[in-house]
Structures are given as C-alpha cells and as structure tokens.
Amino acid sequence: MTRFSLIIIRSFGIASVLFFLLPAVPQAQQAGYVEKWLESYRQSGSFQQITAFTVDHERNAPPSAVDRATLMEPDQNAMYQLLQSSPSTITFIIPNAYGSDLELELVKTDILAPGFSVGELGDQAEDNVSYQPGLHYRGIVRGKPGSLAALSVFDGDLMAMAVDGEDVYQLGKMEDGSEQYILYRTRDLKAASPFQCLAEDEAVVPDDENAAGDRNADCKTVQVYFECDYKMYLDKGASTNNVTNYVTGLFNQVATLYANENVSIAISQIYVWTSSDPYASYGSTSSVLNAFRTTRGTNFNGNLAHFLSTRNLGGGIAYLDVICFKNYAFGVSAINNSYQNIPTFSWTVEVVTHELGHNLGSWHTHSCNWPGGALDNCYTPEGNCSPGPAPGNGGTIMSYCHLTSYGINFNNGFGQVPGDRIRTKVQSASCLASSGSTPTGLTTSGITSGSATLSWGAVAGTSTYTVQFKTSANSSWTIAGTTNTTSFTLSN
C-alpha cells in the first residue's frame, strides 16, 4: 500500500505554495521552475496546436542587420481565432528556415495585477484609459530540457521569446511597414547589446538577509508601476494602446525569467506620456532617475516604479535593495524598439530584468559584496577583491558578461547565489502581502491499496490547484496533476 507522507498544493491562480500535514524545511528553489510548473498541465490535459505563420520563400534573404533569419507571413485568421478562443494550453509552432521548427508548449498566464489600469499623462491626462489586454503565455521549447518560452498575442500583433539552452530566439513584427514577422537568434544580430548599468547604491539598506531556505511558504507578488515617456509614445505610432501592448508583451518575457526563479511579479499600472514629458531635457539615466523619484515620490500604484524611455540615455539604472522603501523604489531603463527595422526585445528584456533585480536586492555578479567575493570575471570587480571565475556556460542576468565573449545565457537565470538573495528579499518583504492563504480542512477519503482522494477548502481567488506528492520511501516529489475543484484522486 502506498503511504502519502506529505502533500503540497500549489494554487497557481495566485502563485501560492502551501505545505500540509508534516513539517518540512523548504529548499532553495532552483532555476527551472517554469518547466516543472508546465509539467503539471501536460499531465492533466492536451495542448491545442496553433500554426499562425508560413515562411516567406520569395523573400528569403535576411535583412542586412542580421546574419540569418526566417521571414514569415502571419495568418491573421489564426491569430484572431487564438485571441477569441483563449485556450489555456497550446503548442505554438514557429517555422524555422535554418533548422527544426520551434514548438513552444505554453500555458496561459496572467501578468496583470488585480485592478490593473492604464492612464495617460500630459496635456490631456486621463486616469483610466480603455484597454483590451492581450493573451500571455509562458512555457518551454518542446524537446529542450531546461528551456523557456514566452508568447504574447494582441489584436494585430504578436511577440515571442524562446530560450533553448544554446540560443535566444526572438519573434516579432518587422518595423518596416511590411507586416512581416522575423525569427532570429540574438547572436546573429550584427549589433552588440548597448546595455550598460549604473546601479545606484544611495538607498542601500542594512543587510538582514536570512537563508533562502528559511523563507515563508506563502508566495508574494511584486507589483510594478511603469511610466513611459513621450518619445516611446511617438515611436509606437502615437498610440497608448500600442505602447501598452509593447510594455505588457516585453514584461511577459521579463516575468517568465523571474517565474523560472520562483519569483512572482506583475504589472499594477501603466501611464503613458502623450505630450512632452518633464524628463525630456535630461540626458542620462542617472539624471532621469533622480528627477523621476523627485517628481513621482510615493504617488504610484505598486511596490516598484520603473521609467521606460526610447531615448538614447545609455542603458539602465536602479536603486539597490529598496523593495519596501517606496521613496527609493525606482529604476530607469533606456530601451531600443528596433535595430534597422528588426525588433530587439531581448535587449529590452535584459535591461529591465537586470534593473528590477537591483531593486530586489541583487548586486552585480562582479561585486565584492558577495560572500567569497566576485562571482565572475566579466568585469572589473566592484570593491576590493579579486575577479571571480570565468562563467562556464555564459553569464547570468546580473552580470556584465554581455560585454565579453561569454555573453549572457538566459537559461542560467540569475544564478544560484543572486537568485537566492532575490527570493529571500521578496519573501521576507514586510510590505508584500502573501498572494494567498493556506487551504483549510485537508482530508483524505476512499483510501485503497492504490488510491486516495484528497479534499480541501477553497482559497479565495484561486482557479487552479496543482497537487504534488511523495511516498514515504521517496525523497522526490511527483506532480499528480491539476484540478479546478477542491478535490483530487491520487492513484498508483
């Protein structure tokens, strides 16, 4: 007879992690959480196959700005049907003229916080602008263990990222007015990432960090307020809707990288400047950061406030370790819409993910503040210590390895040490409410030699539960499946 010694129920509708029955010591979460999360959906249902692109064989020469790429024509009807049907799980097929098609196994996710809203700033300011959100998915590349994927679909637009362990693929609409889409590997883009970071440590708070394994069981979500400058508004066709689609689409990719580290983030609000903004006269990210903090103060809806600009300001900057210090919970990212008409989402994803990482407590990997000193040798150490070791398989998100031949490998995430610090900071943040509460009334019934039925009380706001179990003789967890009800039958 199988004995179930401990049951974990994860309510992914609100991203909470809940422990039951026997006491247990949580382990530091390893990167790869998205793959484990998706596995529970794979076991419980089928994935609808979606094909929305065909290769443009008449225009097979890649643009001059990229060494090789696949140009595609969209099937607008397929994209429309996807938006209308809004399936929970899909396999999204992306044609690849230089190898096997990319098959993305994806689960629909919600990146918008409860009460999300869009507003406009400027001469015609408005607090609640009508906006129809797109669909956002995250998951993996089929057949690629440890991979990551994100897809966002809007009315007339689509953007996707696939990280397969070796390369980062970007799929987006060309900026040349052709309505064509392009798939390319970021390493094939002839321009190097222009990203540079100036972490601002003025607001550093005392280090009261506990071990990552000591964090609370209840998950917390960091809510991010975005403010977009007038230049971005103009670059996106003077359309608040276009800006919002772009920001939510890139944020889905950022949030996927954080989700893979078991850190939950969501957009609480987006404001767009539709006339000249007060930061237009500032020529650097540091000056914009100071002005943004002074102007906005604590008057924003979210835990962190982030300013986005498409002006050439030179990378990004953010205050360090300020998640519960709203006077300093600010960051700035100067982003690139495109390079010679080619969408460059990965540059933007890199800088925004990196700067938010500073807000959440992480130093650069070449900082001497880490126990034992710098974690890599990708840049001159910040402080009085020797360079760290060379990264074995590319750098991590908080590194400067994009300035070297190592590059940054999104599959590496933040790396164990920075990731543990961020997870600990989020889970110990007193200003963040837990995303959910523990279900009550866990009972078992119908116990036989090969099965048992679990039942529990509903958690408000939760639509889906994932059940994991382990036997008394096994140290590893098995994902039993997902359910939309408050009961589940386990069987051998």
Image (tube, helix red, strand yellow):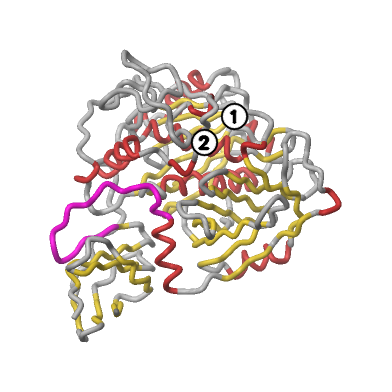
Residue 411 position, x and y percent, is 47, 44
Q: Residue at x 81, y 48 (%)?
A: 60
Relative to the observer, which residue lies in front, 206 or 214? 214
x and y percentages locating residue 204 in the rendered image? 30, 24
- Look at the numbered discs 1 and 2 and tell me whether their residues touch, using CB distance below 8 Å: yes
Q: Mark 2 Cα within 10 Å, few/some/many (few <14, many 20+)?
A: many
Q: As shown in the figure, which amino acid type bears the numbered disc 2? A: Glu
Q: CA distance from mark 1 to mark 2?
A: 9 Å
Upstream in sequence: badge 1 or badge 2: 1
Tell me which corner region of the image, top left, top right, bottom left or bottom right, holds residue 35: bottom left
Q: Residue 328 appears at what percent x and percent y?
A: 36, 28
- Callout 2: SS: helix
The residue lying furthest to the top in this view is: 384
Q: Provide the residue designation for mark 2.
A: 350
Q: Is residue 30 magenta?
A: yes
The circle on residue 193 is 1
- State which region is magenta: 17-34
Residue 306 seen by the camera:
yes
Question: What residue is rendered at 57% in x and 65% in y?
Answer: 91
How crowded is the residue under tag 1: few (<14 C-alpha within 10 Å), some, or many (20+)?
many
User: In the image, is residue 184 above or below residue 280?
Assistant: below
Quadrant where the N terminus lies?
bottom left
Residue type highlighted by circle 1:
Ser
Confirm whether residue 319 shows in the render.
Answer: no
Q: Which mark is residue 37?
A: none
Left or right, 45 with reference to 74? left
Q: Magenta includes 449?
A: no
